[in-house]
Amino acid sequence: MKRHFLFALLCFAGILSLAACLPGLPEFAVPTLASTPDPNRVATSVEKTVSIRQTIAALETQIARGTSLVVVETPQTTRISPTVRPPTATATPAPTVILPTQPVAPTAAPTSSVSCNAATFISDVTFPDKSVLSAEQSFTKVWRLKNSGTCAWNPSYTLVFVSGAQMGAPNEVALPASIKPGETVDLTVNLIAPKDSGEYTGLWQLRAPDSQTFSTSPKNEPFWVKIIVGTTTMSGTSFVDAFCTAVWKNGTGASLGCPASRSNFTTGSLMRVDAPVLAGGTTDNEPALVTIPADGSDGKIIGRYPAFKVLAGDHFVALLGCMNASPKCSVTFKLSYTLDGSTVVDLGSWDRIYDQNWVKVNLDLSSLADKSVQFIFTVGNKDGASVDDTAFWLSPYIKR
């Protein structure tokens, strides 16, 4: 602060020295009173005097403020302009920019749309829709369902009749066992076909222990049994075409799915083959019903077809043998029938091994004319094992 003040005093002294050297100043300093003053000279002197005083006043002000002065001289006037010193630069902190953020929606806790009790229809194990039965014929309907809910089923759950044709069934049937979510179960009900010809439908549902009923997804529809009561004739390859209308079981009485997804030499299986390769490598252009008996002692596979009316002159015709690439095949074929659903009568049996000596069957059915007959196909293993017992019924049909 002292240095600024000293510097200002020196500047002030310099200005006074300059003022003494300015032209015309002696005449102002030593005026001649006796002579008449020149108006122009007086004005000039006054102007210079005023300017000097203004300079001094400005200097005093700047001394107080600590601001340096620069003297600027023009042809007409002399003035002192203040030169403002730039302020010392100070770093200005960059402003913190807060960007707007998109509000994040709260994540809702996932909710399950799966019900406690729900079922999915898998297949008709026996008697698919519009199976033909004779009047008052006893039959067993089996549905395969999947537990697609979150709660396990147990024998407290029941299969209940809803509406339609009850066909001699009870109002409800308890489930056979506990079924966990994701597991399948075969639901069975014993029925009797009505005595009058026509088409009949019975609707069924499941019922939980709390009396709430539920059906099959996705529309929660009841599952049903649909049959046609009457008589029909079978011709061409209809035993193959209608093989899933038959009730198929193994020797232990366990129901078999129809058709099987693969060959099963343990529990038995059946499927249709449209271009079968017979033992020896011969490919036939007629469809075959390929049956595999269950393994073990008295292992077999049995199929009972719906009843139809035999006419005079009808013959049962088929070709029997082992499929190709089954060198250990050793089986017994048997054809039987029943009229009342209980008493079984054998029509014939044929042993076959793996060779090209296939058996051609041609049976006269005249003794069964005008009767409603259920044919029964049976294949059993001969040696207590069913390693590769793949036996074919090639184009079995009723010839008229």
Image (cartoon, rainbow, N blue to C red):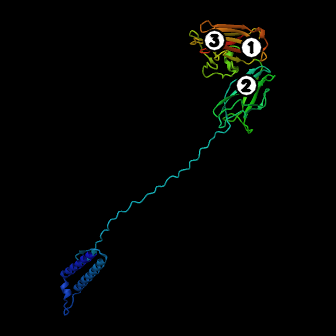
Q: Is residue 78 visible?
A: no
Tell me the quadrant of the picture where the N terminus can be found.
bottom left
Say if mark 1 contacts mark 2, CB within 8 Å. Answer: no
Instruction: Return the x and y of residue 207 as percentages of the image width and height.
Output: 73, 35
Figure quadrant of the C terminus: top right
Contact? badges 2 and 3 (CB < 8 Å) = no
Query: Of the residues under marks 2 and 3, which one precedes in the sequence?
Result: 2
| Among the two numbered marks 1 and 3 on one chain, the one whose residue lies closer to the N terminus | 1
Spatial distance from mark 1 to mark 2, Cα to Cα?
A: 20 Å
Residue, disc 3: 383
The residue indicated by pointer 2 is 141
C-alpha separation, residue under disc 1 versus residue under disc 3: 25 Å
368 on left or right of 48: right
* Quadrant assignment, res 17: bottom left
- Kindly report the distance in space between the C-alpha atoms of the residues bearing marks 2 and 3: 33 Å
Residue 285, image quadrant? top right
Badge 3 marks a residue whose secondary structure is loop
Q: Residues within 10 Å of mark 2 (few under 14, many from 20)?
A: many
Label 2: element kind: strand
* Mark 2 residue type: Lys
